[in-house]
Image: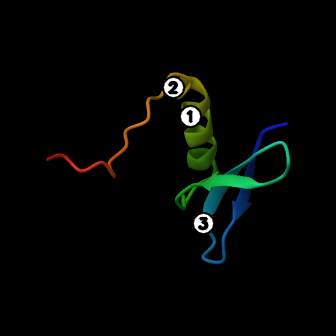
Amino acid sequence: MYKFEVYKDKAGEFRFRFKASNGESMFSSEGYKAKASALSAIESIKKNAPGATVVDQTKVDV
């Protein structure tokens, strides 16, 4: 099961990581001063990202 994990980093900021069902970390967030801000970011991703597109910026335009 996919999940978000909220944790505190060494600097005391709140961060979250998104983990796959196999336990592998897929991505992590920036640091937030307030836990509520990290939780708000998670909710925003859950609400707004289902239809996100992929933009490949590695392609060279000639």
Callout 3 amino acid = Glu
Q: Are marks 2 and 1 in contact (CB under 8 Å)?
A: yes
| Residue 8 appears left or right of 52 | right
Considering the numbered disc 1 on the image, is that residue within a helix, a strand or a loop?
helix
Task: Tell which circle, 3 or 2, labels the residue nearer the N-terminal end.
Answer: 3
Callout 1 amino acid = Ile
Callout 2 amino acid = Asn
Label 3, on which residue?
13
Mark drawn on residue 9: none
| Residue 5 appears left or right of 39 | right
* Pick the front one: 2 or 36: 2
Residue at image position (73%, 60%) is 7
Measuring from the top left, give residue 13's x and y in whole percent. Answer: 60, 66
Q: Are marks 1 and 3 in contact (CB under 8 Å)?
A: no
Q: Dot 3: within a 10 Å radius of its alpha carbon, few (fewer than 14), some, or many (20 or more) residues?
A: some
Query: In the rendered image of this protein, does residue 5 appear above or below residue 2?
Result: below
* Pick the front one: 44 or 12: 44
Q: Dot 1: within a 10 Å radius of its alpha carbon, few (fewer than 14), some, or many (20 or more) residues?
A: few
* Pick the front one: 16 or 12: 16
Label 2, on which residue?
48
Considering the numbered disc 2 on the image, is that residue within a helix, a strand or a loop?
helix
Measuring from the top left, give residue 16's x and y in whole percent. Answer: 66, 53
| Residue 37 appears left or right of 1 | left
Query: In the rendered image of this protein, does residue 62 appear above or below residue 40?
Result: below
Query: In the rendered image of this protein, does residue 37 appear above or below residue 43?
Result: below
Considering the numbered disc 3 on the image, is that residue within a helix, a strand or a loop?
loop
Label 1, on which residue?
45
Measuring from the top left, give residue 46's x and y in whole percent. Answer: 61, 29
User: Residue 21 falls in which quadrant of the image?
Assistant: top right
Measuring from the top left, give residue 31's x and y in whole percent. Answer: 54, 62
